[in-house]
Amino acid sequence: GETTPIKADNKNYHFMNSNEGYEGKLKIPHIIDEFATKILGEIKDPQTGVMTEKADASLTEFAIMFQFEGDKNKTRYVMYYCFASRPSLGSKTKNGTSTNERELSFKASPRPLDTVVKRSITSADDKDAYDNWFKKVYEPTAVAA
């Protein structure tokens, strides 16, 4: 986010905060068909399995949940209102058993209804919420203002 000063009487009178969300890149070995069709708008032929990408495909928002390896607090995150770009396409010849990765860019924006961008929890917080974090997208029963 950014902070913008509002000036009055030759001084900073008020500060406005702007949070437009986050941008990131996701590297994975394979884009599953369900993500390609539901989120990226690709079309799968039910008889042949052929996947079709169209230039005018409608993107659908999704939530992304993750945890950084090595984080001493074991913080888990969810970003709610994400949109993804078309994933990279390519291949490399490598020695060994390395897997080629697909990369897609995503943007997590504030949700239109409540402006929530992300939530997080650490292993020191509520055990039940933490243990069940990756089972479904977290939505609190009540949110403090």
Image (cartoon, rainbow, N blue to C red):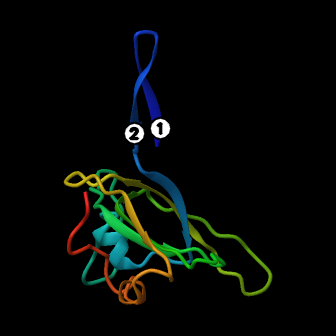
Decide which of 135, 73 is in the foreground and name it. Answer: 73
Callout 1 secondary element: strand
Checking the image for residue 2, the label placed there is 1
Quadrant hosting residue 64 = bottom left
> If the image is split into quadrants, where does the C terminus sit?
bottom left
Q: Judge from the rendering whether residue 27 lies leftward or rightward of residue 55; answer left or right.
A: right
- Tell me where residue 131 appears, x and y as whole percent: 42, 89
Q: Amino acid at mark 1?
A: Glu
Decide which of 5, 112 is in the foreground and name it. Answer: 5
Q: Name the residue furthest top.
A: 9
Note whether 48 is above or below 142 in the view shown: below
First reached walking from the N terminus: tag 1 or tag 2: 1
Q: Judge from the rendering whether residue 123 lies leftward or rightward of residue 6; answer left or right.
A: right
Residue contact at pointers 1 and 2, CB within 8 angstroms: yes
Q: Residue at x 44, y 25 (%)?
A: 5
Quadrant hosting residue 81 = bottom left
Give the class, few, some or many, for how many residues have Cα within 10 Å of label 2's Cα (few <14, many ≥20).
Answer: few
